[in-house]
Structure formats: structure tokens, C-alpha cells
Image (cartoon, rainbow, N blue to C red):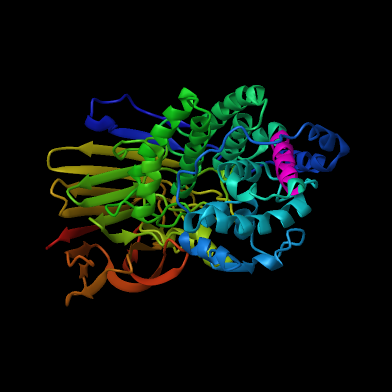
Amino acid sequence: MLEQPPKSPEADGIEEGKRLIRLGGDRGLSLAERVSERLQRLTWRTPLHTMRLRGRHPLKLIAVADDPFLGDPARGNALLDGMVTFRGESREIAGLDYARADWSKPFGEYLHSFAWLRDLSTVTTRARAAPVAEAMMRPWLAAHAEKVSETAWRADLWGRRILFWTAHAPLILSSTDLVYRSAVLHALARGARHLDRAADRVQVGPPRIAAWCGVLVAGLMIPGGDPRRSFGEAGLQRALELSVFDDGGIVTRSPAAQLDAVMLLAMLCEGYAARRLDPPGFVEVALARMVTALLGVCHGDKGLSSWQGAGPVPGAVLEQIVEATGIRTRPLKQARDWGYQRLSAQKTVLIMDAAPPPVARLVEGGCASTLAFELSDGPDRIVVNCGGARMAATAALAEGLRTTAAHSTLVVGDSNSTAIHADGTLGRGVGEVELSRHESENSSRIEASHDGYARRYGLIHRRLVALSSDGRDVRGEDSLLPSDKRRRKQAPPFAIRFHLSPHVEISPTADGMAAILRTPASALWQFRCRGGALAIEDSIWIDGNGRAIPSQQLVVSGEAAPGGTSVSWVFHRAR
């Protein structure tokens, strides 16, 4: 729920003030909802659901859509060598046992979605790739084509599978074995019938978008699919209304999820193009808004910043994806509902999380990152978040990467601004964010506050950040203010953390109150603070491959006085 003051006539659609409230944000699915979901999945195994999956299966596909995106060459070459690799995990193709999964959840989703078809087709020809694809397809069919079970028959995975099967049909349907070809097409038809009933029951966001895209592509590519296409368009429109904010941001607030949804819609549009049909107008409108919002959280290197568990997708990869969508647009400066604010001047870009965290029922693995920011100078990142919680190698590391301390913001009492639960959800904490933004000829300024520490410590965290018009000065102030008039004797410790890119060299000054930062491009930035003690500590940064890279962080620490505390700081580009 958002409460907004009247809009002011600002350039670029900038609103001066706003209040964002997280209603019911700490409540996950209720017991009744969990039971209903469980019962619904149990019905998949009943004779009634088996009867619903029966029907004619196609002899061929009407058309083959293009996959407009490039895959991962390293993973593709590994497939040619007989290995499936994903985020540091690997299995031999010859030893894959789909009936007895011995792999992690992300690895299993990569397998079951058939996203590996994109990686395989990226590195070789159809003649060389088809035997590899068939070798992986046959055991999957034997284990799951006729048996409805988790995880293989999850609706969002069936949606992705239909997208990849139809886009890469030459790789999986090149065999002269007619029985095998018939089994593939029969499984495709059964999966589409399953989606007809299950697509609306998966989580909103990319999972539901994926499921309905699968329904639509099945309607486009399987003969006699016109009724399904009409049904699917209505379902996808509902899914987008629930999954995407008015500003184009995904409700999970994750840039990785945003990128995923953009790619799903782009693949859907290719399905329409293969049939020489125009996609529905609401799809084109949503895709344009989503690309604009996505660019708003990109740095000067054109790569994604790290928020809500996402890692830093490289600029070259993101450029290819955006180009493939056909959308030409500028970055969104202010995502009013998605919650990310963008300041840019010359080569300097600052991206700030100025909204409550995602609500528990919409996302698992969310991060307590309110009022954190990232800063870059041209192609070089300077201030970052540790990021990559969804890509971490271990559960313990993932939990640590979700904490407030893993983000470039203020931490009180070494605690999180929003509670992090063991089941992956976020609990109580930040319920309201006050936001004010002002643009002038000399600078752009954001002032925001959150109540994440009000309940425990009686303190409101207010952060002011201003970027000069020449891009050479980033000035900030972090304040801890009493949330009410009650007197408190406690003076909890606080720490303001500025995690630095591992490519930045740090040299402390003699007075201990400043540091010189050198970027790979040899630019010099000076950091100075007042109101706390400055220290340089170790940190880590999760790169685009999920690897933990050692780095350092600037930490300004002190104690929050009962009457309030303020710390000012500045990043100045000296050269």
C-alpha cells in the first residue's frame, strides 16, 4: 500500500515526496494457504488429474520460435564434454538419474527447465548438439513424462520447459526414432494440459509469468491451440497485473527476477513472431516498462547492481538481452513502487534502495537492505553490496549475505533492520519508508528514513545523499533520531558500512578519518567522515558466477546517543 502526496511538476517524472508502507510484510503464507497448496499438489497424483491430461498429442509443431538470447559458453562446452555444470555443481550426463535427485535445488531447476538447451545451442551446430540433447531428454522422459510429481511438474518449470522445447525443437526432435519423437510431443501436450489448471496457482512474479507464457506458447505451437491462446492471454494479463508494479518493477524487488521476467516475455514475443502474429498490446506495454525499470538499476558498466540476492550481471550480457527485446529506452530515475532511486551526473551513478523490503508471502531469500546504496564511476564500481545471496555456495553464506551488515548502509546493535527468518522469509522490521527527492541545477538529493530500529532501539534511521551536477561529489549524512518522546538511557553501537569493489585500492590517511580510493581506471576518490571512528575491515563480494571475492569495507562506528546521533561523510573525486 502506498500513500502519496500530490505530484509536483518535476522533470523526468520525479516526485518530491512519498511514503511507502509494508502492510502485512512479515506474514508468510497462512496455515490454511499452505494446506491448500499441499492438497492441490497431492491431487496431481490422483486418477482424476491423470484423466485430465489425456487427449490427442500433436504429430508436429506448427512453427519453431527463435531463442533471442545467448547462453553461457562455459556451460555449453561442458555439455559437449559430457558434463552438466551449474554454479559450481556438476554431474556426468551418462550418470544422471532423474528419479533419484542427488543435486541442489538450483541445479535441479536448471535441469528440469531445460535452460541448458540455450547453453548447448550457443556453442555448437545442430548436428553436434542434437545427440547431446537427446541423451539428456530420453532419461527425463522415462522418469517424468508419464508420472506427475515434484519438482519436474511444477507449473513454472513446465512453463519454462515449453518455451525451451519449442524454441530448440530442432535439437530434441531431430531423431529418426519415431517412438522417441512421439514421446516428446506427447509429453509437451500433457504438460500444456497440466498448465491449463496449475498456472494460476504458483507464486506471483516470474514463476507465474513463466507458467502463463508456457500456456500461450503451447497454444501458438500445438495445432488447434486457438482456444488455449485466448485463455492464456487472459491469464498472463492477470499474472502481470499481480507481478509487476505500475513503474515496471517486479514485486519481489529483485533485479535478477526482473531480468528473468523480461527474458520470459521476450521469448513469448518470439513465439508470436514465429506465427506471424502480433503479441497482445499489454505484453508490449509491460515489456517496455520493465526494461526501463531494469536499466534504472544498472551501473556505468551497464551491468546490474546487487540487490535482493541478485548478483552483478555483466554489462555485455545485459546489453545483448536488452537489444534482443527490441526496446529502446532510457534508465528509469525513480522507480516509485519498485523502490530504487537512481542519481546520475556525468560518469557517476548512484543507486539506492529507498523502499521497504519485499513482503514475506511474495519472496523467499529477501534481504534487509533498506537505505543501502551502490556507487560507480564510469565502468568502475566503487561502493557495492556484498550481494549474491541466491547464488551462494552454502546456506550459511547465503544467510550472511542477506543481512543488513552485508549492504552499504547503517546497522544498529549489529542487528538487521528487518528480521531474517530461517525459512528464507523476512519478518518484522522496516514497515515504513519516508522519501523525499529534490532536483536542482547544482545537485540531486535524496532524503529517506525507515523505522526498522524503532521497535527495538527507539531510533529512526535517516539517510541523506546528494550528488553534485558535475558528478565529483557524493555527500551524505546518516542520522539516528528518537522515534518518540520517551527517554532512553541505552546508547547502542552503530556502524555505517561502505562495502568496496574488490578492484578498488584503499589507502588510509594519516589522521585516520579519511581514505584514498583508486579505481582500475586510475581515478582517485577521497572518502572523509565526521561523527564516528573510521576503520578499514575485510569484506567479500559475490561476482556474476557466484564466487566470493575478497574485498574491503569502510566502517564508520560509534554509539547512538539517546537524543540522536549524526554522521556526515563525503566521496570526492580528486582526479
Quarter where residue 457 is shown: bottom left
Quadrant containing the C terminus is bottom left
In the image: residue 486, left or right of residue 209: left
Residue 190: in magenta span: yes
* Front residue of this view, candidates 397 and 380: 380
**Most prominent secondary structure in the magenta stretch?**
helix
Nearer the observer, 560 or 182 = 182
In this picture, residue 9 sits left or right of residue 133: left
Q: Is residue 454 above or below residue 538?
A: above
In this view, 276 is above or below 87: above
Q: Quadrant of residue 85?
A: bottom right
* Residue 31 visible in the displayed image: no
In the rendered picture of this protein, how many numbered marks are placed on residues? 0
In percent of the image, x 51 and y 30: which residue is there? Answer: 272
**x then y, percent, for residue 165:** 61, 44
Evaluate whether residue 114 shows in this view: yes
Residue at image point 46% right, 23% down: 281
Is 275 located above or below residue 142 in the figure?
Answer: above
In magenta, the rendered stretch is 180-194
Pick out the residue farthest to the bottom. 510
Residue toward you, 169 or 6:
169
Q: Position of residue 308 (x, y in %)?
A: 47, 52
Outermost residue, right direction?
A: 47
On whether residue 93 falls in the magenta region, the answer is no
Residue 346 placed where, x, y %?
A: 17, 48
User: Which residue appears at 35% of the width and 48% of the height?
Assistant: 319
| Residue 347 placement (x, y as % from top left) | 19, 51
